[in-house]
Image (spheres, rainbow, N blue to C red):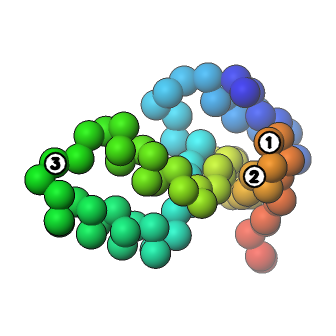
Amino acid sequence: MPKFSCRCGHTVNLSKSDNTEERSLVSNLQIDKIAYELATKNSMTDDVFFELIDVGLVNVIFCSKCGRLYLEQSKGSYVVYTVEK
């Protein structure tokens, strides 16, 4: 998904790997599990880290223009959250 159009009209460019508008939402429980793995194992490869971080991960697109958050429910389907005024 190289581009994403926000309802405000802003186009979010997702094709660059260093973009700040594509984010991930990870539960505190999963972070605790990863921390436990790091503390109890001698080493963790990046493959294992990403396998663990992907469990229950929610992809989020952030519009830097209006502040909307798009949380992915299923592939290509998003729930939209807006900033209260």
Is 36 above or below relative to 73? below
Would residue 6 be seen by someone viewing this image from the given angle? no
Of label 1 and label 3, which has the lower sequence position?
3
Quadrant that contains the N terminus: top right
Q: Which residue is mark 3?
A: 43
Which quadrant would residue 80 be assigned to in this image? bottom right
Would residue 80 be seen by someone viewing this image from the given angle? yes
Label 2: few (<14), some or many (≥20) within 10 Å? some
Q: Which residue is mark 2?
A: 72
Label 1: few (<14), some or many (≥20) within 10 Å? few
Q: Which residue is mark 1?
A: 75
Q: Amino acid at mark 2?
A: Glu
Is 11 above or below relative to 40? above
Asked whether the residues under the numbered discs 1 and 2 touch, taking CB atoms below 8 Å apart as contact, a structural biologist would say yes
CA distance separating discs 3 and 2: 32 Å
User: In what element is the residue under mark 1?
Assistant: loop
Asked whether the residues under the numbered discs 1 and 3 touch, taking CB atoms below 8 Å apart as contact, a structural biologist would say no
Residue 81 drawn at (x, y percent): 78, 65
* Left or right: 39, with 19 as reference point: left
Q: Amino acid at mark 1?
A: Lys
Which quadrant would residue 9 be assigned to in this image? top right
